Amino acid sequence: MSTDQLIIADRSFTSRLLMGTGKFANNQLMAEAIRASETEVVTVALRRVDLDAPQDDMLAAIDTERILLLPNTAGARDAEEAVRLARYARMAGCPSWVKLEVTPDPRYLLPDPLETYKAAQILIKEGFTVLPYINADPVLCKHLEEIGCATVMPLGSPIGSNKGIKTRENLRIIIEQSHVPVVVDAGLGAPSHAAEAMEMGADAVLVNTAIAIASDPAAMARAFAKAVQAGREGYLAGLGPQSSLASASSPLKGLMWE
Ligand SMILES: CC(=O)[C@@H](O)[C@H](O)COP(=O)(O)O
């Protein structure tokens, strides 16, 4: 087993690629992509599945022996709706982990910081392990960490936009300050975006759209997995500093004709 484990709450994971399950053309493509990604955490929108129906095709496609099924509260417009969805998942037998998403505005799907904080407080008191999706706001991240969130999940850019990391400076501060894993979530549209997040020192990334809408989702999932691994290894190896001036790679003194 790799010694470089991602630890979230009381669980450890080898893969640092979390995957969403929306937007796949069918469950078979989704299952193939999940396998190819080697992910160990898959998020599922509570609104999309019937937790009371064990034969629900979508859940059947996920090997829950190996993979943590992380219910998310996608579609919740305020704290009350998010809390209701999380309680429903637990009552239906899901683990007490929840990816908390509160997005009142359907146009940009940006997370509501106040309602997310409020819901996180309630759910943590009720014993949930809470992984909140949030704006890349370093102050909010600190507050969520202080009340006991298991991770922070700041966005790279809006959900489904594929624009990559547009929040780089704030992410840098969040990564520097955080004592819980930082999972860059949303907007990562290409494997290089995921590598960039990992090279910055993010602990993990979450990707859905870019994999689901690729012409070959399984191949794209594999590409993301490699990029996440490469970015992580680059980060651990210690990237050199950037400079606005050039510095020669070969010696400029002692040349043969000198
Ligand atoms: C908050 C949310 O819904 C994201 O987890 C989303 O599923 C992933 O974002 P992308 O679809 O942009 O990869």
Image (cartoon, helix red, strand yellow):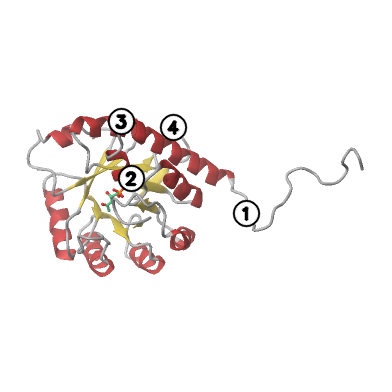
Q: CA distance from mark 2 to mark 4?
A: 24 Å
Q: CA distance from mark 3 to mark 2?
A: 14 Å
Q: Amino acid at mark 3?
A: Arg
Residue 210 point in image, percent of width and height: 32, 43
Q: Nearer the viewer, mark 3 or mark 1?
A: 1
Q: Quadrant of residue 85?
A: bottom left
Residue found at the very far front of the displayed protein: 257
Q: Earlier in the sequence, mark 2 or mark 1?
A: 2
Of residue 53 and residue 26, the one placed in the foreground of this image is 26
> Residue tagged by mark 3?
35
Q: Residues within 10 Å of mark 1 (few under 14, many from 20)?
A: few
Q: Residues within 10 Å of mark 3 (few under 14, many from 20)?
A: some
> Residue tagged by mark 1?
241
Residue 214 point in image, percent of width and height: 31, 37
Instruction: State whether label 2 is within 8 Å of ligand 1.
Output: yes
> Residue tagged by mark 4?
1
SS at badge 2: strand
Q: Earlier in the sequence, mark 3 or mark 4?
A: 4
- Callout 3 touching callout 2 (CB < 8 Å): no
Q: Amino acid at mark 4?
A: Met
- Callout 3 touching callout 1 (CB < 8 Å): no
Taking the image as drawn, is residue 36 in sight? yes
Q: Amino acid at mark 1?
A: Pro
- Callout 1 touching callout 4 (CB < 8 Å): no
Q: Is residue 154 above or below residue 212?
A: below
Q: CA distance from mark 3 to mark 4?
A: 18 Å
Q: Quadrant of residue 26?
A: top left
